[in-house]
Image (cartoon, rainbow, N blue to C red):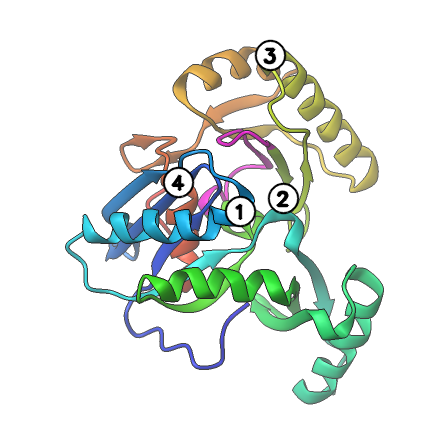
């Protein structure tokens, strides 16, 4: 969801604020797409929830201090469970104001938060004139993210969902397994808005692969998606363990690649940076 005051003449930073790491990417335009000009990653030590925001702010400031860029506009990611995205079809003749009211009514049905506790946004979907992306986020969580960013003197211009960001990074894939944190997620790229499934934290590799295979079978059954190409984001060691377990089911498995880099820890931050120019990247 984009903030109405956003000025995107300069490319915004991509910022990942996770309980395990903070990553920052400075993008630059190259050959009609985006590539990475600078990046920084700071590990967040295990921290009680009551002190997590302060720890994230400190890690973010350290990451920014290590970069040469003076850019302060940025794109953040909403936590997996704190935002809902849906395809919103615009009926012929419906004005934008009417669409906004209709989006609020749909949010009453699909979002788990009352209207006083949520933010609703409609954004265009590239290449689809009569379809919009309906995003619904928990207001308190989004405000918390903005506060952390502003504590580092950043100016958020948008808050994206991880699923949409990963889709821009791997447009050639049918699905992506994000196994880069303690809690993995499977994203299936069916239709204009990807779906995702979260797994229990800290699954061993064999159990995670089994859960991912089951999720792909369910996607084929429920969404009529036949997954052939599966991209995996994980450390090299974990990728080496997961790849044969998944490839054995007939999937073409490959790691996330960004230019010459293979599954760098700032991958999601770069995916967020492509929000401003999603048509083509260096991935």
- Mark 1: give few (<14), some (14-19) or many (20+) Cα within 10 Å: many
How far apart are the alpha carbons under marks 4 and 1? 12 Å
- Mark 3: give few (<14), some (14-19) or many (20+) Cα within 10 Å: some
Give the percent coordinates (x, y) of residue 245: 60, 12
Q: Secondary structure at mark 1?
A: helix
Residue where numbered disc 3 is placed: 245
Q: Which residues are magenta?
A: 169-184
- Mark 2: give few (<14), some (14-19) or many (20+) Cα within 10 Å: many
| Residue placed most toward the observer, 6 or 123 | 6
Check if mark 4's residue and mark 2's residue have beta carbons within 8 Å.
no
Residue where numbered disc 2 is placed: 189
Check if mark 2's residue and mark 1's residue have beta carbons within 8 Å.
yes
Q: Earlier in the sequence, mark 4 or mark 2?
A: 2
Q: Secondary structure at mark 4?
A: helix
How far apart are the alpha carbons under marks 3 and 2? 21 Å
Q: Name the mark nearer the viewer: 4 or 1.
A: 4
In the figure, 79 relative to 240: above or below? Answer: below
Q: Earlier in the sequence, mark 3 or mark 2?
A: 2
| Residue placed most toward the observer, 57 or 238 | 57
Residue 167 - label: 1
Q: Earlier in the sequence, mark 4 or mark 1?
A: 1
Give the percent coordinates (x, y) of residue 192: 64, 55
| Residue placed most toward the observer, 206 or 194 | 206
Q: Earlier in the sequence, mark 2 or mark 1?
A: 1
């Amino acid at each position: 969801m984009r903030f109405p005051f956003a000025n995107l003449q300069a490319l915004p930073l991509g910022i990942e604020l996770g309980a395990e790491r903070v990553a920052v990417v400075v993008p630059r335009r190259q050959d009609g797409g985006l590539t990475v000009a600078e990046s920084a990653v700071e590990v967040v030590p295990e921290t009680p929830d009551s002190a997590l925001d302060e720890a994230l702010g400190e890690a973010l400031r350290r990451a920014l201090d290590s970069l040469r860029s003076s850019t302060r506009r940025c794109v953040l990611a909403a936590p997996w469970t704190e935002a809902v995205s849906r395809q919103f079809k615009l009926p012929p003749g419906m004005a934008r104001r009417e669409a906004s009211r209709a989006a609020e009514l749909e949010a009453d049905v699909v979002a788990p938060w009352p209207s006083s506790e949520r933010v609703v946004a409609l954004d265009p979907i590239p290449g689809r004139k009569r379809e919009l992306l309906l995003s619904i986020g928990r207001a308190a969580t989004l405000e918390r993210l903005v506060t952390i960013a502003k504590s580092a003197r950043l100016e958020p211009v948008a808050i994206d969902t991880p699923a949409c960001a990963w889709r821009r990074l791997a447009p050639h894939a049918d699905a992506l397994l994000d196994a880069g944190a303690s809690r993995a997620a499977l994203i299936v790229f069916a239709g204009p808005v990807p779906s995702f499934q979260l797994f229990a934290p800290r699954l061993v590799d064999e159990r995670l692969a089994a859960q991912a295979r089951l999720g792909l079978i369910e996607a084929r059954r429920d969404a009529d998606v036949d997954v052939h190409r599966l991209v995996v984001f994980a450390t090299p060691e974990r990728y080496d363990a997961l790849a044969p377990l998944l490839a054995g089911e007939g999937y073409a498995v490959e790691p996330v690649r960004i230019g010459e880099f293979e599954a760098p820890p700032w991958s999601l931050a770069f995916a967020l940076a492509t929000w401003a120019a999603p048509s083509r990247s260096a991935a």
